[in-house]
Each structure stands twice: as C-alpha cells, then as structure tokens.
Amino acid sequence: MLITNIFFAAFLLMAYLAVFINPGDFILPAFFGLLYPYLLIINIIYAVIWSVNLRIYAFISVVAIILGFNHMSGFIRPSRPGNQGEPDFTLMSYNVRMFNRYEGPGSGTTEDEIKGLVTEFSPDILCIQEYYAGTGGDRLAAGFTEALGKNVESHIKLTGRGRGSYYGIATFSRFPVVSRGEIIHPNSSSLTIYTDIAIGPDTFRIFNNHLQSFRLRAMERSFVSEMIEGTEQRLAEARNVSMSLRDGFVKRAAQAVVLRAFIESSPHPVIVAGDFNDTPVSYSYRTIRKNLTDSFVKAGYGAGFTYKGKYPPNRIDYILHDDAIKALSFSVLRARHSDHYPVMGGFSMTN
C-alpha cells in the first residue's frame, strides 16, 4: 500500500507540471493533468486511511495535495457567492454534439429540446459548438433566432461536410454585431470565430471556440467493449486511444498559442467561451486564461464538470473574460441533450 501511495502522489505532482510544459515538448505531464481530479481523490483516500490508522505516511499524500491546492478551485467551488445584483447581459456556451444526428439508431435529434432550453434560459449571447447545419443551415439558424426573440444577429462558420451535411460553430446575439472574424486551425476541423458585439456604449470581442478534440468517438464503443470483454485486441485499442490523446494534447496546445495571440491583439475587451477540450490543469487552459478571469472560479458554485460522456466526467467548457466586465453568476446547466452540459454566466460592465 505504501508503494502504491508513493506512486499516486508522484502522479499527482506530475499533473501539476502539465500547466507549465507544452505537450509538444514533453507529453507525459499532460496525461496526468487530464486525470487530476481522480488522482486528487485517490490521494485524499490514502491520506484518510493513513490518518485513521495514525500512520505518519499520511503526509505523503497530504504534502502532494497541498503543493497543488490552488488547482482545486478550477473544479469545485464550495461556497455559494452572494447576491451580486442583476447582470447587464448573459452568455451561454453549449457543445450540442450535432444535435445527436449521428449517435446511432433510436437516439433521435435534440434540436427542439435545445431550442426549448435556449428559450427557457434566454441568454443574450449564445455560443454553440458542433453546430449541425444540415445542407445549408438557414432553417436551423432561423430556429435559434426565433428561440432568442426578435432582432437577433448571428455569426456562423461551417467548417466541413460530414456525411453529406455541414457542421461548424455559431454565435447568436441580441446585441448588434459590429464585425466578424475567424481563426482557421491548420490540419484540424477545429474552429474559433470572434464576433465584435456592441453592448451599450462598449464593444466586446466574443471568441467562440471548439478546440481540438481527442477524436475518440469513432473508437470509444469498440474500446470500451474490448476492455470489458478482454479480447486480444485490447492492447491495440489502448494504443490507439493513447495516440489519439497525444495528438489532441499537442494540436490543442498549438491552437491555444494562436488563440492567445489573437486575444492579446484584440482592440476590444474580450470574452473567451466554448469547448476547450482540456481541463483547468493543462497547458492549453493556462495559456488561454493568462490575464483573464474564469467565471466559474469567480462566481460558480459546486462541481464544475461539464463533460458527461462515456469517459470520466471532467471540466472542459469555459467562459473567460477580462477585467472590463465582472462575473455575477455562473451555472452548469444539467441538461441531458448532449455529452456536454451547457454553461451560462451573468455579467456586468465594470465601467
């Protein structure tokens, strides 16, 4: 037990390095960073077991936990923020998984359910990732415009054709759109669009992101079944998953560096939202968040996990902002229409 405790404490310490080391230079810490919440729980269990038995070995995990204590705030907020007043505007970000179009027989589409969610929570700005647009997208865009009400403007970028239909990323706004731009990430279907939106006398640049995924969906069913059934292909499937993870870490880190440069060159205050496909204990997140506030850390409550797919839950969807605005509220909405939960924040202007 002592030996395994030392190993798990070392793994936790290795996870802390993930925020500092570019996966393109050294990949190993990124894997442990992805597992941070679970390595933390394991070390807490070890510390409790040793403490109950009055053994000094409890300090192995206690010290490892304390050294990275600040990372906990990226996953859980134990205290509920007080009433901060009414927001000047709200923003929702949601990876809709192409409205379940390709999730297999009997899954059904979720367009109507998601439009109903949008109508219910009525965000002023809506950022959608994995936006399924059919063969053109006008009908679907009109549906979201209707869900948000009159005078809604949109910014939609379709990045490719999947099984005969277009998909991409979309931002809808009740405020006037001043200009639109995009970031094309090379050798990837990932996308970032930025939309300049006039809110009162101020203009904000909204970055809507869907960064490189691990691309595990095509193999996840076979991988999970192989792990359960224990066939000869299990090792090969595990290697495939490992390579997909590595490719995702490296490409996402490069995309984060590019996005950071666009953020720093923005002529307007920024809000950076979307599916980063990486956790708060990652090089990508740290690169993007630099000098920005994480609205969950500032105004959230409870567990911040936003991914709920076949793999262990984690936090990979965000709304970050600079000091031109203040986060008054942040919620992870437990809607079950995708493998992500939508996130929503309320904000006020600081000037």
Image: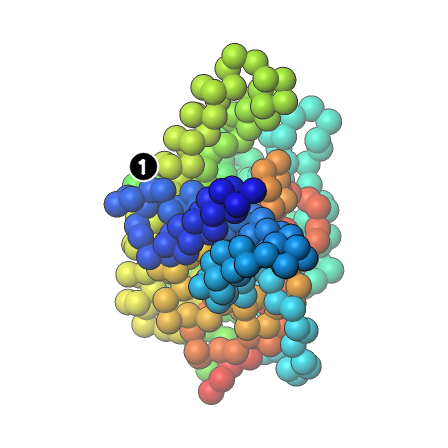
Viewer-side residue, 240 vs 85: 240
**Can you see residue 197?**
no
**Can you see residue 28?**
yes
Give residue 224's quadrant in the image: top right
Q: Residue at x 70, y 53 (%)?
A: 334
From the top left corner, tell me how far across and down residue 54 is, in percent: 63, 59
Give residue 290's quadrant in the image: bottom left
From the top left corner, tell me how far across and down residue 70 is, in percent: 48, 67
| Left or right: residue 100 compared with residue 73 | right
Mark 1 surroundings: few (<14), some (14-19) or many (≥20) residues within 10 A: few
Q: Is residue 310 above or below residue 344?
A: above
Q: Is residue 276 above or below residue 31?
A: below
Viewer-side residue, 160 vs 45: 45
From the top left corner, tell me how far across and down residue 349 is, in percent: 51, 81
Give residue 83's quadrant in the image: bottom right
Q: Residue at x 42, y 25 (%)?
A: 239
* Quarter the N terminus occupies: top right
Viewer-side residue, 181 vs 264: 264
Q: Residue furthest bottom?
A: 351
Q: Which residue is mark 1?
A: 187
What is the three-letter code of the residue carrying label 1?
Asn
